[in-house]
Image (cartoon, coloured by chain):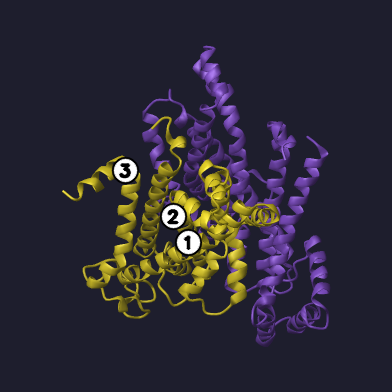
Amino acid sequence: MSLNYVFRRFGVFLLIVWAGATINFLMPRMAPVNPIRERLLQAVSFGGAGKTDMEAVVATYEARFGLDQPLWKQYLRYLGDVARLDFGVSIANFPSRASDIIMRALPWTLGLLTTATLIAFALGTVLGALLAWPRSPGALHYFAAPFLALSAIPYYLLGLVLVFLLGFTLRAFPLGGGFTLGTLPGPTLAFAIDVIYHSIVPALSIVLSSVGFWALSMRGMMVTVQGEDYVNYAEARGLKSREIFFRYALRNALLPQTTALALAMGYVVSGAVLVEVVFAYPGVGTVLYRAVQTFDYFVIYGVVLMVILAIAVVTLILDLVYPLLDPRIAYRR
Amino acid sequence: MTLSPIFAAARRHPQLAAGLIVVFVVLAFGPVGTLFVDTDLARVGSAEPNLSPSLEHLLGTDAAGRDLLAVMVAGTPLTLRVGFLAGAVGLGIGIILGFLAGYFGGLVDTLIRGAADVLLTVPGLLFLVVLATSLRTAVTVDMMALVVASLAWMLPTRTIRSQVLSMRERAYVQVARLSGMKDLEIIARELLPNLLPYLAASFVSAVGAAVLASIGLEALGLGPQNEPTLGMTIYWALYYTSLLRGMWWWWAPPIAMIVLIFIGLFLVSMGLDRIANPRIWKVSS
């Protein structure tokens, strides 16, 4: 892997994070009325506890946002804040910092999402590979059909149906939440089991509705690979069909499939955010939902930036691992 | 007799035919429904709240006293409107940018491709959340479509760009160029007609993505508050905890309709894909 490639890829990473931060900066400033200022003044006029503190927040915010400084200075300062992951304070839960709220929720989202996505990716890839293999049993197509149909349904809508069937009707699983209310979160086995128990249905809804997507994608890659000369040559050499499948077709089709995983991260995360809303799962999706309800701008922008950052990191890692899997990539421009 | 070519085509492309039928049924649901159902009942407080399905209210009523069959009849066309409008705008932008990038290349290509690639890796829904919360005014259905369209152009741009890139070097384009055709004329008379299957497939997937994005935004509460779109119906159902109250007739119909829309669009795009890329489907089918 050439150093040049690493640097170039890191530049793209910075570009993505910078673009996300800049859009977050510009969006409220392009609106006819500055929505953040309006919301802050509204919070002050409601008064209540911490009113004087809130006025201090408005003063700080105006100093940064107001016309007393040129736009580029505000922008540089904003970029500095973002670099330190300082998103400001929560308007709705005033003294808490937006970054604290997000950091508390992030492990839940990461845990649920990584597990569910990896399971779905693995199952879908195997299923797709078998679907494209001429020697797999015909019954497989009937087995795969329901998954392909489910892939047309957004995660969270399938989640709603699953909660109704498994949680409400059968009462086999909890209706929502990340753990039983009243239990003390801690590193105990009982708590871990409780967390897993609560995440089964949310994870199931993500897995069931994305297996078909990965299967279709893998099938496409396999069909392309099977048309390649080296597969024909392997057949002509009289290699065993199973060996061709594993060593020639599957291994080469896995490469573009990994790229597809990197490209789909944004879509996967957007879907998972809404799954959390349906299940009231204590991750960033629910934080975002509550923030949207109360127009808690700093939390909204903080969540968006954190997710962009997380996805950028994941794609960066995938892209840096990729040349190890496929040496051709690092040398091609 | 005159219908027989249609049947023959349907037999050759069963997915496309099935998909078109589903899409047509969904499209017709609203207009046909108004003949039988009074859509005024979709307003808040027009009926007794929390009724389970009965002969009088076939799909029951919600907690705010809306007749849910009327909500479905009034809401389905609104959701489709958002999808088709946003899909059309997204495809329009995609055609312009895709041709600019693919045909002229150079710096324009680098910039357009870079912007599309960066925006593609970013979770679109979250950007739309930022946009929609920054507007902070009462959103209308058409505004909703434009918000969604602002992120619906990247995939069409990429698809069209790569197709144009490969077509640009084909012999018939070279011949047209040698015979003195202007660039715009080549694009309009040689490239566009050959791209039609791709454009149709891009449009269908853009519509699907737009419906998905709009429902996602609405489920977070960022849709038109006073319009009974499918996504807003789901939002209210979640907001008033219809699930815990066992009011399945509230959330199940909009979900069923959305699933129908997606399955229809999915089948159509698979069918179009087979026409546009016959090679991918050659093996095993």
What residue is shown at x 51% (from left), y 27% (from top)?
Answer: A226
Q: Quadrant of residue A74?
A: bottom right
Q: Residue furthest left?
A: B1
SS category of the residue bearing label 1? helix
Query: Percent x, y for residue A71?
Result: 79, 76
Q: CA distance from mark 1 to mark 3?
A: 24 Å
What residue is shown at x 56% (from left), y 28% (from top)?
Answer: A250
Q: Which residue is mark 1?
A: B87
As drawn, is B139 to the left or to the right of A168?
right
Q: Quadrant of residue A60?
A: bottom right
Q: Which residue is mark 2?
A: B204
Query: Percent x, y for residue B83?
Result: 45, 63
Which chain identifier belongs to the purple chain? A
Q: Quadrant of residue B253?
A: bottom left
Are dots 2 and 1 in contact, CB under 8 Å?
A: yes
The label number, if any, that marks residue B14 in the structure image:
3
Q: For this rendering, which residue is in front, A179 or A100?
A: A100
Residue B69's place in the image compared with A114, above or below, is below
